Amino acid sequence: MAFRGLTDMDIERQVATLSQELAALKKAMARRGGTYYEESRDMARDYYSDIAEWLGNSLPAFRKRARGVEATARDHPAAAVAVGLVVLGLIATLAYSRR
């Protein structure tokens, strides 16, 4: 074995050196972890602002379409009920087919 010639002092020095290296690695990992956290936080903030901007720009068009659908449903209530029942039937079919 290679360890037969080692003295207690040699082993203690090696353990101390390994402890210092381990401490340095822990510090480096903490810095990298902080950097990754900041980068992911910035990326999430960017995504949120992009989505908020897209919704802000698209909301008037959604409202206009919703008013059109509402007017159509008022003018043709039987058709609106039929479409609603068809949609509910499709959802029920999908829900029960997965079981």
Image (spheres, helix red, strand yellow):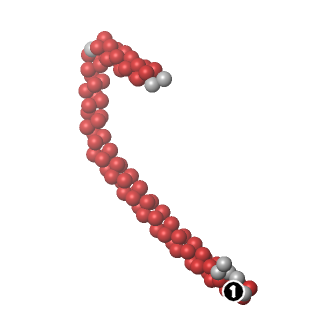
- Of all residues, the one furthest to the right in this rendering is 8
Q: Residue at x 43, y 60 (%)?
A: 40
Q: Quadrant of residue 93?
A: top left
Q: Is residue 60 left or right of residue 25?
A: left
- Of all residues, the one furthest to the front in this rendering is 1
Q: Nearer the viewer, residue 91 or 57?
A: 91
Q: Residue at x 35, y 49 (%)?
A: 52
Q: Residue at x 29, y 36 (%)?
A: 62
- Above/below status of 39 relative to 3: above
Give coordinates of residue 30: x percent, y percent.
54, 70
Q: Nearer the viewer, residue 59 or 7?
A: 7
Q: Is residue 57 something that shows in the picture?
A: yes
Give coordinates of residue 72: x percent, y percent.
26, 20
Check disc 1: other Cα within 10 Å, few if <14, some if 14-19, many if 20+: few
Q: Residue at x 37, y 57 (%)?
A: 46
Give coordinates of residue 77: x percent, y percent.
31, 14
Give the SS element for disc 1.
loop
Q: Amino acid at mark 1?
A: Gly
